[in-house]
Amino acid sequence: MKLIAYSKALYSTWMYYAPDRILFDCGEGVSIFLENRVFAIKHVFLSHGHADHISGLMGLINIRNNAMGDQEKELRVHYPAGSHFVSELIHYFARTNRRLQYHLEWIPLQPGDRVNLLPGRMPRYIEAFATVHSRGEPSLGYNVAEVRRRLKPHYRGLSQDEILDLVRAGRRDEISEEYVQYLFSYGGDSVPLNPALVQGTEVLCHEATFLAEEDRKEYKHATLWEAIEVARKAEVQKELIAFHISSRYRGELAAVEREIAQKKLPFSVRLIPPDEVVTLE
Ligand SMILES: [Zn+2]
Ligand SMILES: [Zn+2]
């Protein structure tokens, strides 16, 4: 999984998820950093319409029209249905960008909606889920989901040869079942996510605006410790990526990382520091 991420609470958040060419949120600075790699982006998924998550759209839409690259490549921007701020932006772009060379599509989503990414034997899709952030501004999180196949529990004791014999005898559907694996979950801005919505995900991106509960004045964001608790309850398989960290904590992150290491969690924890673009492989 390759991820390029920038996130500083209040200022800007964007994450480019390379495996499916998805930009999650589009804060300021994304085009400046990615330059003509913006042409790799196929889909944008916005978590909500606050400025720190959408202020890079003007640059992205313009650069895709003018920089060196495939200027006719379609761009699909998904956003929470009913977002007042995004609706205003759509009007703005419709009035000011009449001569776009490419098809720009705006797609409103509700919790539970799915967007297909890859067809085939192991189809992939994005599933939107509800988050709780700001009154009056709808917000969504997104799971990258893959449909997989596994042996039904009753058949798991069989040897490879026995399984092959059953498959050759045309009994594949009888001995195996489909299941859905979440590969990557992006929560956007939110109070602690409902763990059931990201259950078993390999990688969870959970916001962690605050390190200390007492710094939180309004209940709109999560603390790092709440994010870790969500990851534990959701049984995250590989990694928790904590983002949207307030810059007030920039001097404290190394100490916090040591504190987390002592907890011996069953997944790794990665903090996105508020001052740098981070590339994760
Ligand atoms: Zn934010
Ligand atoms: Zn917000």
Image: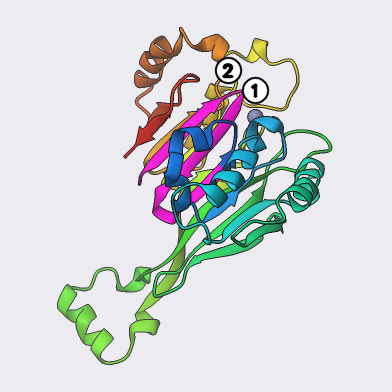
Q: Quadrant of residue 84?
A: top right
* Kind of element beneath mark 2: loop
Is residue 267 in view?
no
* Three-letter code for the amino acid on which mark 2 is drawn: Ser
Does the closest atom of ligand 1 sit within 8 Å of the Cβ of label 1?
yes
Q: Is residue 17 magenta?
A: yes
Q: Residues within 10 Å of mark 1 (few under 14, many from 20)?
A: some
Residue 172 visible at all: yes
Residue ID at (60%, 57%): 76
Residue drawn at the location 38% of the way across and 22% of the way down: 263
Q: Mark 2 or mark 1, which is nearer to you?
A: 1
Q: Which residues are magenta?
A: 1-24
Q: CA distance from mark 2 to mark 1?
A: 8 Å
Q: Nearer the viewer, residue 86 or 227?
A: 86
Relative to 156, say whether 241 is above or below.
above
Q: Residue 246 location in percent, x, y? A: 58, 17
Above or below: residue 258 compared with residue 157: above
Does residue 217 show up magenta in the picture?
Answer: no
Nearer to us in this view, 75 or 254: 75
According to the picture, the residue beneath numbered tag 2 turns out to be 246
* Residue for point 51% across, 42% down: 234
Q: Dominant secondary structure of the magenta stretch? A: strand
Q: Which label number is shown at residue 10?
A: 1
Label 2 neighbourhood size at 10 Å, few (<14), some (14-19), many (20+)? some
Disc 2 residue lies near ligand 1 with CB under 8 A:
no
Q: At label 1, which amino acid type do we have?
A: Leu
Do the residues bearing badges 2 and 1 touch, measured as CB atoms within 8 Å?
Answer: yes
